[in-house]
Image: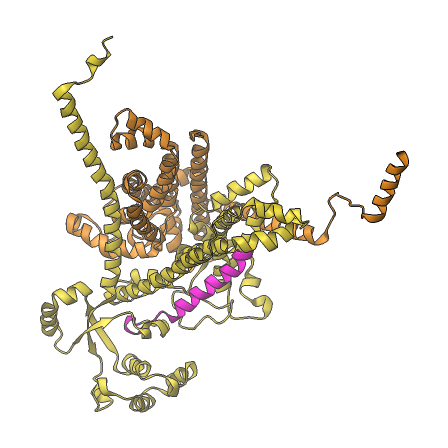
Chain colours: A yellow, B orange
Amino acid sequence: MNHQANYPEGDAFYSELRTRYRSAAIWQFVFLSALLIAIISLTALIYNVVDGAFGFIAYEYKKAPTEFTATPVAELTKDELLVILKDNLSKGAYNKLDKEQPMGERSQSDLLSLFLERLVRIDTKGTWSMTDSLMRGAEIRAEVAKKYPDAILEFRSWVTPQFLVTPMSSRAEFAGVRTAILGSLWLVGIAIAFALPIGTGAAVYLQEYAPKNWLTNIIQTNINNLAGVPSIVYGMLGLAVFVRFMEPFTSGSMFGVTDSNGRTVLSAGLTMGILALPLIIINAQEAIKAVPDSLRQAAFGVGATRWQTVWHHVLPNALPGIMTGSILALSRALGETAPLIVVGASTFISLDPDSPFSKFTALPIQIYQWTTRAQSEFHAIAAGAILILLALLLTLNATAILLRNRFQRRW
Amino acid sequence: MKEEILNLKAMETQNFRQFDLKKKFRVGESVIQTLLFLAGILSIIITLAIVYELGKEALLFFNDPDVTLLKFIGGTKWQPGIGQYGIWALVSATLVTSFIAILISVPLGLAAAVYLSEYATLRARSTLKPILEILAGIPTVVYGYFALLFVTPILKGIFGDNIQVYNMLSAGLVMGIMILPLISSMSEDALSAVPRSLREAAYAMGATKVETSLQIVLSAALSGIGAAVIVGVSRAVGETMIVAVAAGSGPNFSFNPLEAAETMTGHIARISGGDLSYNSIDYTSLFAIALMLFLVTLVLNLISQWVVNRFREQYE
């Protein structure tokens, strides 16, 4: 019996124990630091976006405002602006603007930006991030004063109420995300209308009706696999099926719409719906699974048919779960960019989408396009658009969580 | 006595309705059931449609007299305009970015999972877990912005002129951060499925917490972790926006992460974003690439499911 000879005893034992404890402490720190890295990354990302969305901008006027009026720019009233615009804009341009929204009904700030965009014409010399603007303010001031003596330097927030309601523009200083937000809402709306009923139906079929056989097995495996297909592949499917094959339907030429091809908000919305479908099904299945069997048996016991059981007992109880899951799936779709690029989001469009057969752009598409531009002022509005997208997503997710907490029942 | 029974039977038929317990055929029920079945089967139709559409266009691509399979899988230059169809020019970038992403996300994700499942108190969990969930919920285009405008400048500071403005390293690193929550949440599920008794047995033998976590729990959960890694690879291969923004736009057969190169997904996004005429070789070639992507991710996902089912340790 010489087993114990292999194990340390006495001091050796304690010294080995100390080593083991030390390595335990080191490992624990390693585990924790992985989470710290995740936290740091998230902080850096949010800081990076916020940093880009505010900061100094230096610009020159191509024409001095004094050429149009004696009043300083900051003190111009609405009426003065109306007169200036009417006098100096070409008749065609004025009428076009008036058609988009009657000039008299526009706000002072709207008119002011029109004045600056169309008549004075701003020429941006540079933009700076928030950190730079705050930390090196004096330096930047000196630099700008030296390089561009005529330039005006001001601290600007790129996310403003104005930014939300202005349509696209080719000038970053005057661009807004109105078209993009409306486009995103149309997309999500169409995706919900398509995917929610079908997804719930499929989940009900799989949980309540499907016999246990090979077909059900294949459907289930297939749904899990579809959830893992890269989104750009869905984009290719949308391009081939909705944009090209179903063009008469998705372009609206079947319904008498003439001036469009298949690259419409309808095609993109349906593509998004298909993309969200597997997630919606999986989430709805979980919700239906959570409804206890005793409910079904009670319903069957009093003679309800299967559909009566599902419709009156299972679905109402599973509804909060289904809604939560669907909202989460759609917030996924809201941030999707790649399939939209493939299906053919417009690169530049300033008209609001007003029917399923409109051309469209969406928030993530704008972010992508602005990020890939070389000029720093476009990066600034990209950051602004990201803040709005993140705020939208946060609202959606908060709604989902609230729904879950408010209506979730424990059995 | 016999009469009494007969009487009773007569009473029964008088007072009680006869029930037919056989299932009745109801039109409404069958219509609804059919509709639900169609909704269920739609997912299969979608898969078939993907295979059919991608396959059809890819076939057109391979039927082009210019294209040979040998050129496709043997070549290292991709320029459909002048008859060069070497897929390696795009695959190399996909491999490099995915490899970097996995190199980052697997160790970090696994460590985070071990901490969350073995160490974290309930309170720590409830604050740490949402952070990972937020990371998982951020749209990939935002990660692209982060890669190009935050990580790239930092890398530029480290590598100086050796690194290009668009480079695979930055895209890969950020992609790793993007996949981290996926790996950690899947691994954590696998770790928490390991029964308590195994841990307690290890403690009883005098093992420290780390020894228990790494040698007992981790190896018991290995199949689930393997599945998580495979799903992570499939996510990395299919990821588009980060590479489209930060990795560069132009096929480049190179395994140097400091260089710009275009992945398969990035190429599809760039080409299809421009003006594309149907039936052109550009158009069909995209479908050939997409088909490859679809098959690769499908196989990876199937393997991951198979790993989970095949190697799962069954505990009671």
Decide whether residue A181 is among the magenta residues.
yes
Q: Farthest residue to the front: give it.
A: B1
Give the x, y percent position of residue B222: 36, 32
The N terminus of chain B lies in which quarter of the figure?
top right
Decide whether residue A32 is among the magenta residues.
no
Magenta span: A171-199
The C terminus of chain B lies in which quarter of the figure?
top left
Horizontal arrangement in the rendering, residue A309 relative to residue B247 (left or right) = right
Q: Farthest residue to the top: give it.
A: A1
Residue at 9% from the left image edge and 68% from the top image edge: A139
Residue at 83% from the left image edge and 48% from the top image edge: B15
- Is residue B177 visible to the viewer in this orientation of the structure? no
Give the x, y percent position of residue B167: 25, 49
Q: Is residue A297 above or below residue A398?
A: above
Horizontal arrangement in the rendering, residue A318 relative to residue A379 (left or right) = right
Q: Is residue B142 above or below residue B88?
A: below
Give the x, y percent position of residue A326: 47, 55
Q: Farthest residue to the right: give it.
A: B3
Horizontal arrangement in the rendering, residue B269 relative to residue A121 (left or right) = right
Residue closer to the observer: A117 or A140:
A140
- Is residue B295 visible to the viewer in this orientation of the structure? yes
Give the x, y percent position of residue B154: 18, 52
Residue closer to the observer: A67 or A50:
A50
Residue closer to the observer: A339 or B278:
A339
Majority secondary structure in the magenta region: helix
